[in-house]
Image (cartoon, helix red, strand yellow):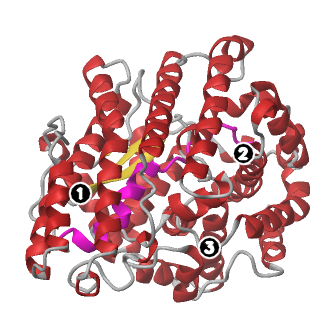
Amino acid sequence: MRGIFTKLACLCLVIVLVVVGCHLLPSVRPGEVPFSQMGYVRPDVGDMDGKVEHCLELAQGGTTPEDLMEAVYDFYGDYSGYYTNYFLAYINYSIDTSDIYWSDEYDYCAQKGPEVDAAFDRLMYALADCPLREALEAEEYFGEGYFDPYEGEDIWTDAYKALAQQETELIDRYYEISAQSNGTDPYSDAYQQTYGKQLAEVYVELIRVRQQMAREAGYEDFQTYAYDYIYGRDYTPEEEGAYLEEIRRELVPLYEGLDASGVWEEGIWACSTQETFDYVERTAQAMGGDIQEAFEAMDRLGLYHIEYGENKLDTSFEVFLPDYLQPFVFVDPSGSNMDMLTFAHEFGHFCNDYVSVGTAAGIDVAEVFSQGMEYLSLSYGDAPQEMVAMKMADSLCVYVEQAAYAAFELAVYDLEGEELTAQNVEDTFYQVGMAYGFDSWGFDGGIYVGIPHFFTDPGYVISYVVSNDAAMQLYQLEQEETGAGLERFQESLDTQQSTLLAFLEEAGLESPFVPGRIGKVRQTFQESL
C-alpha cells in the first residue's frame, strides 16, 4: 500500500475557468511573464454585478453581437482577474502556510468565490435566453452549443448563495485544521483524537450543506447534482456503481497481495529535488515537440515549485493563470522517487493547459493527460525496471483505492437526517475499505479525514479511476509499438472535448465501462507484477 494520503491532487478550482476559458481567452500568449514577476493584487469584485446588469440590458435591447461581446469581455476581464489573483494567493499560501499575509489573502479570495461564480452563472443563463444566442454561439465567440447547460432557471437563488457561502467557510475551516496538524503523524492516535475529530465534524457539516445545495438546485440527490452541474459528466452514477463493483471483484485480490510482494521495498528509494526535476526534463526532451517546448517554458519562467518546505501544504496541483495564459505546477515532495511520478503527473496537466492555452477539457479528460504522462515517463524517462513495477503497483492502488473512495462517497451522501453522524461516516468508510481489501495493510476507518478531495472536491475521485484506465491504454499501446502511445497523447493535447466518453471516442480509445475492459487491466497487472 503506497499510502492513503498519496499526493494525486489536481486543484478542482480550475473547473470554473475551463467552462469559459477556451472560448474567451486569446489563443496566443501576449508575452512571457516569469512567475516571480506576476504581481498579486487583491481582486475587487464589487462592480461585477453592475457589469452583468449592463450585459443584460444590451442583450435585451436590440444591440449587435459585437457590442454585446464587448461588454461580456469587460465582465470577463474582472472574472479572469479574480481567478488569476485567487490562484496566485493559493500558490503562495501553499508554499508557506505559516505566512499570515498569504493565508489572509487566500481566505479573502475564497470567501468571494460564491459571489463571483453567481455573477458568472447569472450572465450565462441570461445570454442563453437572449435573442442573440445563435450569434453568440458562433465559433469566434462561445462556440456551438455552449449555452445548452444554461437553459432553464439560474440555480443561484439567495438560498443557494447562502449555502455556497457555508460550504466555502467549512472548506476554509478544513484548511485551517490541516495547517495546524502539520508535523503530526496522520496515522497516530494523537492526530485522530485532536485534528481527526475536528475534521470529522467539518465533513459531516459539508455533506449536510451539499445535500441542501443539490435540492435547492433542483436535483433529487447530491450524486446526480455533482455529475451534472459540477462536473458535466457523460456517464451516470449508476454506471459508476457497476464499474466500481467490477473493480472490486477483479482487482482487489491482486491488491491484497501487494504488501507481501516486496514491490515497494524494491521500487521506492530516496530522491532529491534535482533528481526529480532531471527525470521529467529527460522525459520531455525524449518526447520532443510541444511537450519539450512546454517543459522549457515552465523552466525558463519558473512556473513550478517542487522544493521541500517545512510549512508547505501537503498536496500537489496544477492551475492555469488566465491573465498570463500560463499554467503553474506545485508539488510537495516526499523525498522519494514517487516525487518523479508526482511531478510527471502535474506536468501532464501543464502540457494540456500549455498547448491548448487553457484547456477545454473537463476534469475526467484532464486527468488522462496527467496520468498518461506518468505512464509514458516510464519509457521516455528511462525508469529502471524496479520503478516500472512500482508504478504498476501504484496504478493498481489508484484503481482500487480511488474506487473505494468513490464507493464511499456514493454511500456517505445517502446518509441523511439522524443517520448523518461522524460515527456513521467513519463506519461507512470502514465497511467500504474492508470490502476493497484495505485490511491487507492495517486499516482504521477514521483515516478518511486525511483525504483532501472528500472535503474540497466531492465526487472528484472517480475521475482518477476512469482516466487512469484511459492512461493505461496509452501505456499498453506504447508497449505494443514504440511511439504509438506517445503519438496518441500528443495528438490529443489540444482537445476541445470536455467529457470523457466523447474524448475517448475521438482519441480512438475504449470506454472504461465496456464489458471485459477491467479483465484486460487485470491481465496487464498480472504480467507486470
Give how far apart the Cα atoms at labels 2 and 3 are: 27 Å
Would residue 324 be visible to someone looking at this image? no
Judge left or right: residue 94 versus residue 79: right
515 or 209: which is nearer to us?
209
Q: In this view, does 55 lie above or below 164?
A: below
Q: Mark 1 points at which residue?
A: 322
Q: Return the x and y of residue 84 as percentages of the image width and height.
A: 24, 48
Q: Where is residue 129 in the image (x, y as percent from the top left)?
A: 33, 75
Q: Which callout, 2 or 1, points at the residue further toward the start of the chain?
A: 1
Question: Mark number for residue 413?
Answer: 2
Amino acid type of the residue that numbered disc 2 sits on in the rendered structure: Tyr
Q: Is residue 283 above or below residue 340?
A: below
Mark 1 belongs to which amino acid? Pro
Read off the residue under disc 3: 470
Question: What secondary structure is found at the residue carrying circle 2?
Answer: loop
Q: Give the range drawn in magenta.
A: 1-26
Between marks 1 and 3 in the image, the one whose residue lies nearer the viewer: 1
Give the residue at x 69% y 10%.
190
Residue 278's label in the rendered image is: none
Task: Name which quarter of the figure residue 519 lies in.
Answer: bottom right
Q: Is mark 3 on a helix, strand or loop?
A: helix
Mark 2 near mark 3, Cβ–Cβ under 8 Å? no
**Mark 1 to mark 3 CA distance (whole Å):** 28 Å
Please state the horizontal and vertical placement of residue 16, each as a whole percent of the image.
38, 57
